[in-house]
Amino acid sequence: MKVRFLNLSVKQKERSEILSAIDKVLQHGILINGPEVLEFEGNVKNFIGTKHCVGVNSGTDALFLALKALGIKSGDEVITTSMSWIATANAIRLVGATPVFADIDDDLNISLESIKRLITNKTKAIVPVHYTGKACKISEIVELAKSASIAVIEDSAQAFGATYNGKMVGNFGDIGTFSMNSMKVYASIGEAGAIVFDEAGLYDRLMALRHNGTVNRETCIEPSLNGRLDTVQAAALNVRFSYFDDVVKKRNKIASLYNETISRYVGTPIIPVADRHVFYTYTIVTEKRDELKRFLEANGIETKIHHPILMPQQPPYMDFTADTKNASILVRRILSLPASENLELDEQEYVISKIKEFFCGK
Ligand SMILES: *Cc1c(COP(=O)(O)O)cnc(C)c1O
């Protein structure tokens, strides 16, 4: 049997709905900033519970524009996690600021204690990531930041719909950012992202920043990039919005079955009882990571490491301050198993049987 890590093909019913939504866009012809973009922004802000949403091209743009909107610039320090997709550090660096990398806890999320150790009088923002689709200690981080007048931008790229103490992530900090790229849990059919926030003053600023820093269509008030969201992607996202709950339920069901069957062999993620984990990745922890990965691969099972290199160990970031005691151990032990909503039960049972075989023999 062959088990792919991620199967992005779309099932018949949803596919025909997406195609007819795209057909509508082609008929009305407003291919950029069409009405579907406003509908998408409305869906996202109502769902997350913020006053505003600005749709953008990608999660990377969302982070970059959010930092820019808050005035983060050269000379400012921005504390983020050590373990994330490199986009998080890149966005900080691209506004000219200095990333400072905090350690992680055993759930792979940013450590509050490490953040406390790294705050200096130059710290202007904290960019925590809700890693793997599980909320980090965001209430505590926001409380700490407020007491020191530091801004918080939640990189919620992996965690659309995840909650912490019953409240949606993206709704705790000054700004929340999302990626809707095709691999994420709430996914477009290409690249997309969103920025959410409550402060009215940020709205006009972000609308200008996502369009080359222009106001009134022409006057440029500040250099920026083209971060607008395609109408076609928004149309697909609006269809997918109605499938989102089902996607998260399926991912949770898959995670529960893994937890029941393999937690005696490997470290498995904690599934919160009162909160929602959206399982962007189902990531296990084992000292035998490399051997297990090779064994699964030899048996036709594709796995991934999210991510094999800590951000502060990437060439452009090696000279920046980093607290990586726990992260540098965990980065050698993490492994993401196939666990998306398209994984069939027989595929999952095969993965489970091969993990058992690896640890116990036939
Ligand atoms: C995916 C991701 C991003 C970037 O999003 P893109 O839409 O791919 O640009 C940023 N941060 C994290 C944590 C991500 O997983």
Image (spheres, rainbow, N blue to C red):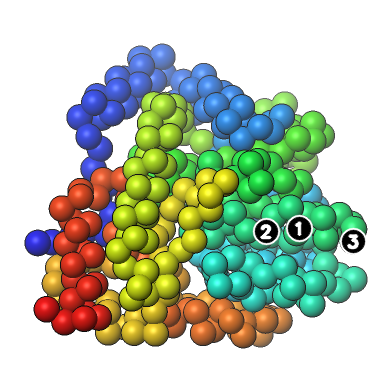
Q: Counting residues from the N terminus, which is met first, the one under dot 3 or under dot 2?
A: 2
Task: Determine which residue is flagged by label 3.
Answer: 148
Q: Amino acid at mark 1?
A: Glu
Residue 18 or residue 353, whichever sits in front: 353
Q: Residue at x 9, y 61 (%)?
A: 1
Q: Does residue 125 show up?
A: yes
Q: Is residue 74 left or right of residue 163?
A: right
Residue at label 2? 137
Place of residue 34 in the rendered image (x, y in percent of width and height, measured from the top left): 50, 22
* SS state under label 1: helix
Q: Are marks 3 and 1 in contact (CB under 8 Å)?
A: no
In the figure, is residue 225 to the left or right of 172? left
Q: Is residue 83 found left or right of 242 in the rendered image?
A: right
Q: Give how far across and how far down residue 310 sits, in percent.
A: 53, 77
Q: Find out if the beta carbon at label 1 lies less than 8 Å from the nearest ligand 1 atom.
A: no
Determine whether label 1 and label 2 are within 8 Å by CB: yes
Front: mark 3 or 2: 2
Task: Give the residue type that dot 3 points to.
Answer: Ala
How far separated are the C-alphas under marks 3 and 1?
13 Å
Residue at the left extreme, as displayed: 1
Q: Quadrant of residue 51?
A: top right
Question: What crowding class fits label 2: few (fewer than 14 Cα within 10 Å), some (14-19), or many (20 or more)?
Answer: some
Residue wearing tag 1: 140
The amino acid sitting under disc 2 is: Lys
Question: In the drawing, does residue 24 fall left or right of residue 177?
Answer: left
Query: Which element type, helix, strand or loop, lies under badge 2?
Result: loop
Near mark 3 (Cα within 10 A), the count class, few <14, some 14-19 or many ≥20, is some
Residue at the spot 90% in from the left edge and 58% down from the top edge: 147
For residue 195, say whether it is visible: no
